[in-house]
Every structure is written in structure tokens, then in C-alpha cells.
Image (cartoon, grey):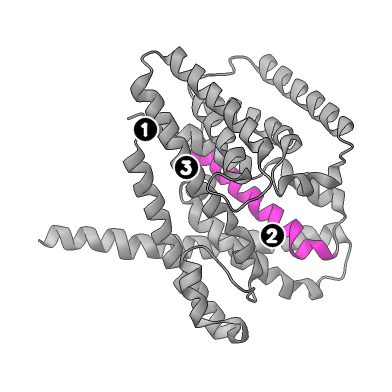
Amino acid sequence: MEKRNYNLDFLRGIATLFIILIHTTFWSGETYLPAWFKNLSLFIDVPVFMFISGMSFNFIKSITKNLKGILGQWKKWIYFLIFYSLILFLFFRDTFNLSEVFHWIAYSFPTTTSLPVVQGSIWFMTMYIKVSILCSIIIMCNENFAKKEKERNLITIICILLLFFLNSTFTKSNLILDVYTSFYSIIYLLGYISYNCKIKKVKHFISFEFIAFIILIIIFTINKISISDIQTIKFPPSFPYLFVAIPSLILCWYLKDYLKINKNNLVNYIGKNAIFFYFSQGISSSLLYFFLPYFKTNIYIKFIALLLINLFLSIIIGVLLNESYNYIFIKKLKEKKNEK
């Protein structure tokens, strides 16, 4: 097993912070921010998470460990739901329905609560589970049957092209292999095969980015897409959206080798424990609606103020959830084992 790459933790932490930014613009920000401004925030988004997840699979290379990781994330979701249900019960009891808790456990929300961003964010989890399982099977089958690295890379590229073709044929999102699963599986597999490749020179990185943006402009021009349409081509993810994501993926591909990150910093802490911060921003982003009436100033000053509030609240809630979870389920369990 390879040594942990702290650069990946840092990049995942940055991606998490960008999710907080995006959910500041696209939820409470819907009422006052212009469309072009909101859509610009989508250039570093979910594809970065999936790309990093694909790169991180190089440290696991096991379907069993991957499934254990998914189970661990589900346990953290249950823990989060206890906190979430308590908040609803104490402060928003009119939208708290005890009978729906069993749906929440399965990442499903039949009705909207007073904290709507939690519900709006959770599509990521069902997509991630399907993508992670599918890609781990593809990768491990490839690892077991292909003898040489070039052969494995070729088979992976063939799988990417096949998924790309399948993605263009889907019209519904309720299948096991739907448009979201196929699209983000492409990103995941690209991350996996790119981990052991390096962009060796800065001029190569700049060239790749320049070409990526030129292609993006061409794709947008041909399809008559503007900056304000990015959210539309993201849900569901389409061919043009892939080219919106590519510049940020190239940036991650370059930085994962050339950052010199110390593991002991807040961004790495967020990246290492991203799941709790992803859950917590659902609460903090929802609470912004209650702060919104108190800011009657320039829209961009309002946005910055609300973004800072969102960052503060999501980090506080995320740290609280993560540290309490570790104390209860890790430290205490270790102490009990040592006593035996």
C-alpha cells in the first residue's frame, strides 16, 4: 500500500470549501446574485471530488476495503442524522416528520424540511456509492487479468470510452447505470489512471490548460451555451459539462505532485474528514436564508458576508461532528479493547 499523499487531502479540502461556496451562491444566492456569477463558481465542483476519489483508489486497490469505506460513510451519515433530527425537532418542529427518518437513512427525502440544502446535497451520496462500486469492480478485474501496466491502462481507456458512449444514450436517471453514474465513472477512472502520471513541467501544464479552455470555448460556441447555462448542463451531466470540468481536473493532476503540504493544517483536516463537512454545509447553507434579510447592502458584499458565515458555521459543525464521532466510536472502542 502506498504512503498517504497529503496533497490529495489538501485538494479534497479545497474542493469541499468550493462546495460551500457553490451552495452559498445557488441556494440563498438565488434571490440576489446574477446567473453568470453563480455559474462561474461551478468550475471547481463535484468532478474534482470524483477525480480525487479515483486517484485515491490507488491506495486501496481492494473491492472489500472500498465497500468497508462506503459502510463507514453510511455510519457517519446515521450519526449526522441524529444531529440533524435534533436540530429539526428543537427549532423546526413543523417540518420534522418522524416517519420519514427511515427514508433519510437510505439517503432519501420524501418531503422538504426547513433545512433544504441537506436534501439538495444528498444526491451526491447515492451517485458516489454506485460509481465507487462500479469503478472498483472495473479496476480490480483489470488488475487481475491484465499483466502489464500498458495493457491495464488501455483497457481502462476502453472502459472510459464505453461509458462515454453509454452516457450519451441515457435519457432517464432511475436506472442502476444511469447518466450520473456513467458520467462520474468516467471522471473516477480518469483520476485512477492519471495518479501515476505526472505533468513534468509548468509549461506543459499551462499548455494543457490553454488547450482545454480553447476546446471549451469551441464546444460552447457550437452548442450555443453561455456561462449562465452551466448549471443546466450539469443536471443531468452532459457532454459539454465534461469540458467545463477538465480545466479543474488538469489543475488537480498537476498539483497532486508539486504541492508541498504539511498534513497538520485546517484544509487537510477538512479534506481528510470531508464527508462530515459535506453533511454540515447542508445545515449551514440552509441557515443562510435566516441571515439573508439582515443584509441590505451591495450584492457582492452581501455574498462575501454570507459566505464567511457559511464557512464558519459549516467548519464548526463539521469539527463538532467529526471529533465527537471519533471520541465515541474510535477512542472509546479502543479503550474497551485495551481493557479486555
Q: Is residue 259 visible?
A: no
Q: Is residue 312 above or below residue 69?
A: below
Q: Is residue 182 above or below residue 21?
A: above
Separation (CA) of disc 3 from disc 1: 12 Å
Do tag 3 and tag 2 residues touch (Cβ < 8 Å)? no
Q: Position of residue 224 (x, y in %)?
A: 89, 37
Q: Quadrant of the N terminus?
A: top left
On the image, numbered disc 3 is attached to which residue?
A: 132
Q: Earlier in the sequence, mark 1 or mark 2?
A: 1
Separation (CA) of disc 1 from disc 2: 38 Å
Q: Is residue 124 visible?
A: yes
On the image, numbered disc 2 is attached to which residue?
A: 308
Residue found at x 59% / y 71%? 110
Please name the predominant secondary structure of the magenta segment in the image.
helix
Q: Nearer the viewer, residue 169 or 180?
A: 169
In this rendering, which labeled residue sits more in front, label 3 or label 2? 3
Q: Position of residue 229 (x, y in %)?
A: 83, 46
* Badge number at residue 61: 1
> Is residue 12 magenta-colored?
yes
Q: Quadrant of the C terminus?
A: bottom left
Question: For the residue marked with disc 2, what is the amino acid?
Answer: Leu
Do tag 1 and tag 2 residues touch (Cβ < 8 Å)? no
Q: In which image quadrant can residue 147 be found?
A: top left
Q: Earlier in the sequence, mark 3 or mark 2?
A: 3
> Is residue 50 magenta-colored?
no
